[in-house]
Amino acid sequence: MVDRNNLFIKNALKLYFISGTNNVNKPLPEVLSEAISGGITLFQFREKGDASLTGRSKREMALKLKQICQANQIPFIINDDVELALEIGADGVHVGQTDANGPFVREKIGDNKILGISAHTIAEAKQAVKDGADYIGVGPMYPTNSKADAEEACGPEMISAMREEGITIPIVAIGGIDIHRTRGIAQAGADGVSVISAIASATSAKHAAEQFRLELEDL
């Protein structure tokens, strides 16, 4: 069972690393271990796109990554694949607007797992709250090449607008985020930043994560 209270979620979202095997230049378990040693606070396995793993290979990779996260007390989230998340005992699931709908996922995973839902507009954010989301992933903040299906960039202003409209659940920003953009994102009302390429493609995932944590330390 994973803690789903707001304070736990807010802390977990601070430095949220997302990656699949096609985002990295060396084995993903190795990159994840480096990123954890550098200070990430949550990991999402997002195995999508060209040359991504499927079937048994995907399951075996998910299990390896989950074991690394568990050993380091890092929550482990799976993107979209509800059945896999349940099968291997992941801590939660994250779904986008074009993935399975929120109420269906919440019913499937029950009350003991984290549910994250992507939102690009205020209306989507409000619906995510109604659908039982524990947190909302808002973005892309800036143009990004990490996701081929990314929406148009909405900027930190969207987070501010969501807060002004009464969205109080934890929010994590995603999309085109580098170290220099973290402060403005936090000041807009985000509880954390989620990063793919800035850590996954770095020469040293540990060093990249450390730099983000230093920038986020006093926010």
Image: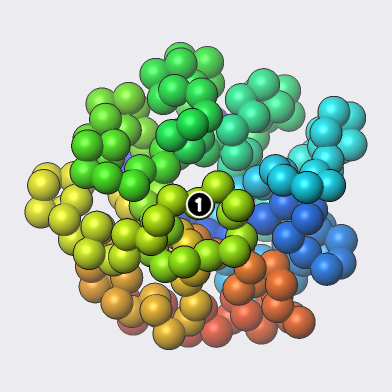
**Residue at 83% across / 68% down in the picture?**
25
**Residue at 32% across / 25% down in the picture?**
131
Q: Indicate left or right for 17 with 4 as reference.
A: right
**Residue at 62% across / 80% down in the picture?**
208
**Observer-nearest residue: 126 or 88?**
126
Residue 64 x, y percent position in the rendering:
82, 46
Relative height, residue 59 to residue 144 (above, below) = above
Q: How many marks?
A: 1
**How crowded is the residue under tag 1: few (<14 C-alpha within 10 Å), some, or many (20+)?**
few
Relative height, residue 66 to residue 34 (above, below) = above
Work out whether residue 37 can be spotted.
Answer: no
**Observer-nearest residue: 119 or 208?**
119
**Residue carrying label 1:** 150
Work out whether residue 88 can be spotted.
Answer: yes
Residue 174 x, y percent position in the rendering:
45, 59
Q: How is the image coloured?
A: rainbow
Residue 134 x, y percent position in the rendering:
37, 38
Relative height, residue 64 to residue 160 (above, below) = above
**Residue at 34% across / 47% down in the picture?**
120
**Residue 158 found in image quarter:** bottom left
- Amino acid type, residue under disc 1 in the picture: Ala
Q: Indicate left or right for 187 with 22 as reference.
A: left
* Quarter in which the C terminus is drawn: bottom left
**Observer-nearest residue: 142 or 84?**
142
Relative height, residue 91 to residue 41 (above, below) = above
Q: Secondary structure at mark 1?
A: loop
* Quarter in which the N terminus is drawn: top right
Q: Indicate left or right for 129 with 52 as reference.
A: left
Residue 205 x, y percent position in the rendering:
70, 75
